[in-house]
Image: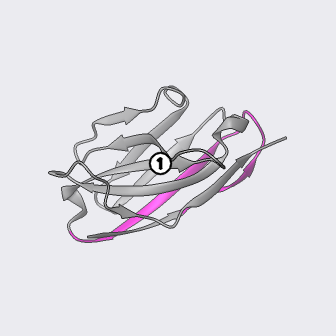
Amino acid sequence: QVQLVESGGGLVQPGESLRLSCAASGSDVLDYVLGWFRQAPEKEREMVATITTYGATYYEDSVAGRFTISRDNDKNMVYLQMNKLKPEDTAIYYCAARYIDSSRYSDWGQGAQVTVSS
């Protein structure tokens, strides 16, 4: 089991940047794929980006080229650099962990609010 704590959310204007951080602790974090999900009001939660221990990444189409996920295995941290933010990026962003042999994200952070508005 992994405990996850997000930080770095806030209010920004369209076109600006924001970086989310997630501190992971507990079981060997190296055995987990880490990811960022988001949920906007009245919408389903969606996967934003994921990263394996070895740095393989996945991005949802609407954020590819604007967002970058990264991981510091020495510090057990995962980051989401968000550039060229749009109002439609407004959501609660969650850090999540999936054991490498599992298909399900079982551990979740408490969420960080990101609001993009002029």
**Image coordinates for residue 2, horizontal then vertical, percent:** 30, 68
Q: Residues within 10 Å of mark 1 (few under 14, many from 20)?
A: some
Secondary structure character of the magenta stretch overall:
strand
Residue 8 seen in render: no
Q: Is residue 60 above or below residue 51?
A: above
**Image coordinates for residue 64, horizontal then vertical, percent:** 49, 27
Decide which of 40, 52 is in the foreground and name it: 40
Q: Is residue 91 left or right of residue 13?
A: left
Inspect the image, locate mark 1, and give the three-letter code of the amino acid beneath it: Phe
Q: Quadrant of the C terminus?
A: top right
Q: Is residue 21 left or right of residue 25?
A: right
What residue is pinned by disc 1? 37
Residue 20: within the magenta?
Answer: yes
Q: Quadrant of residue 75?
A: bottom left
Residue 92 seen in render: yes
**Image coordinates for residue 62, horizontal then vertical, percent:** 54, 28
Q: Residue at x 23, y 48 (%)?
A: 103
Q: Is residue 22 left or right of residue 55?
A: right
Q: Is residue 70 left or right of residue 62?
A: left
Q: How is the image coloured?
A: one colour
Q: Is residue 1 above or below residue 33?
A: below
What span is colored magenta in the figure? Answer: 7-27
Q: Is residue 72 above or below residue 56?
A: below
Decide which of 50, 40 is in the foreground and name it: 40
Q: Residue at x 67, y 45 (%)?
A: 90
